[in-house]
Image (cartoon, rainbow, N blue to C red):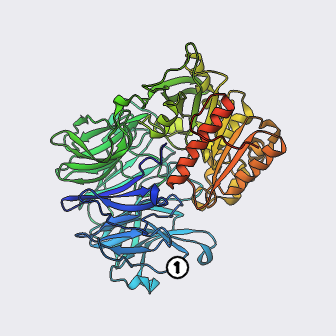
Amino acid sequence: MPAGSLRLDRARYVGDDVWWAESVPSENGRTAILRAAGSDPVLRAPWSARSRVHEYGGGAWTLLDGERFAFVEQSDQRVYLAQPDSDPSPLTPADAHYAHGDLVWADGALWAVRETHGALRETPARDIVRIPLDGSGAHDPSAVISVVSGSDFLAYPAPRDGRIAWIAWDHPDMPWDAAELRVGTLENGRVTEWTRLAGGRGASHGENVSALQPEWTGEDELLFSQDPPTTAARADRTWTQRWNLFRVRFDDGLAHAAPEPIYAVDGDTGGPLWSLGARWYGSLDDGNIIAVVTEGRSRLVLIDPVSGSVAELETPLTGDVHVQAVRGRRALLTGAGAEVPGGLWELDVSARSLRPLRGGEVDLSSGVHSVAEPMTFPGPLGPVHTFYYAPTNGDLRGLEGELPPVLVLVHGGPTGHVTGDLSQASSFFTSRGIGVLDVNYGGSSGYGRAYRERLNGAWGLVDVQDVAAAAQGLVAKGLADPERLAIKGGSAGGWTVLCALADTDVFSAGISRYGVADLRMLLAETHDFEARYLDGLVGPMPEAEADYIERSPLTHPEKLRTPLLILQGTEDPVVPPSQSEALRDALAANAVPHAYLTFDGESHGFRRAETIIACFSNELAFLGQVLGFDTPGVEPVALS
């Protein structure tokens, strides 16, 4: 039974070694910093490197010099200075109103995104700060210098020789809607003037543009990714807005030429910035660029920005690929593939070889792992992209002529994306005779802005139509029993689960992990990062209040008649337990078979081994009870 797939974060070269961050389910989901050379962790228990900025965090540690590193401690969100085999020392104040993330070591200084909330400010604010390493900031808050502020959200601090680049956006936008690339002049550690280089509202032909990941490749050149509606290098062809690589060359100060594309392609080098510090490309020492390009699945390319030549880098990695660090002509990558599970990898560009450093290996000959097949089905508004995992077990066979039950998976976000990776979670079900259909419904990233914006104003409608169309398409192909279709999702995916159960008759069972059940309740209780997310997905309040009411499953509890399993963490700040409790009460009032299971200490996304094991065990038992098949060795769920 799976105890959790690998959760890997930032990786760095450290001398001849490699360090990385990894969530450890057996240690209550704490995030350790581990190393390839040796079994002892770099950051030992009980310390945990995890940021809470934007609630989803990211960039919670960075290497300084030698073996010194800085990290954000999960429990108090302070930044600490540490090295192996020594006790960390604080660098920022012991103030519960501060959180830090997106740590960067550059120009001999430590930089971070700081979030201020609570009693200090009624509305959370963010700024980029410079943190002294002498520890003075631990006792004197004024020693932590505020470099730049003035936007609701900030990311990617990138200083270089008296300048600093960063990404900024404001409510009601999410970073994938419209985000600006800015560059400012530093004087005495603070930005005195700045200019917008790219991105933002109406930035190109009146269209919104999202900029990402600024990185200096020299004193006078800045790389970044953005998704303008047309690409100058390919004036003969336009396509749906995609994140492509661009560069800006500087003269003196902030003077610059217009951004020019480096690689124009109908694919994304970038993605939704849910977690700070995400990187989709890296510059090698020779000036060439390794970049991820995503069109459904991902691939890696090597770009020569001088000649414009592009070479494919053949690897098995096709999903959730990030370029963590580069050295010489080597790169550290995280990601997975159709035939390899998630892991940390080192790519040698010269040798065209890839080796796993952590995870990334599995024995496919066992016959218990299902390899996903991409499938596209017609939907009411256009194609619906999916990945299908067929039931597979080398030791077992289904009954002759029997079609399998199928579990339809709905990812979160809803601006998320699945890539059909070799999945421990999917194999848990497919090895037990249950097919799994993973759906990239309209609103998903990875297929361009138009596909993503199919959901604009239509959350709870388009996503429901797409998952229903995909499930029915699988039935039409003769791959699923129409009477034994179930649907499962978490967070925003849980919302789609509930809407699909209320508004269609396609599914016979549902599983909601910390799912949204009432839009107005979500709007009132959710955190600042997503406080205006629903403006785009449903509409601004109060103008769209009627839609908020009408679409919410709890508005029409009489329509919820399908057996449901509800799983909820008690400390979830994104979708608080009140949503699941209200759903439970509505099901109980209508005598709908259901179970409501809570997990103490869990937040938005389960991390503890015992929680993950309990969830999969109860999900299997629930599906067996409702859909009518045996689940040997698994205790039944107590349905009310």
For this orientation, the residue located farthest to the front is 633
Q: Residue at x 71, y 59 (%)?
A: 524
Instruction: Identify residue type, mark 1.
Output: Asp
Which residue is the site of mark 1? 95
Q: Residue at x 82, y 40 (%)?
A: 591
Q: Residue at x 22, y 70 (%)?
A: 66
Between 263 and 547, the one lying in front of the other is: 547
Residue 267 placement, left or right of 479: left
Q: Residues within 10 Å of mark 1 (few under 14, many from 20)?
A: few
Q: Position of residue 628 (x, y in %)?
A: 66, 28
Q: Quadrant of residue 138?
A: bottom left
From what the image shows, is residue 166 above or below residue 174? below
Q: Quadrant of residue 152?
A: bottom right
Query: Could you tell me which secondary element the residue under label 1 belongs to?
Result: loop
Q: Position of residue 80 (x, y in %)?
A: 39, 74
For this orientation, the residue located farthest to the top is 401
Residue 96 placement, left or right of 622: left
Residue 606 visible at all: no
Query: The C terminus lies in which quarter of the figure?
Result: top right
Q: Position of residue 306 (x, y in %)?
A: 20, 44
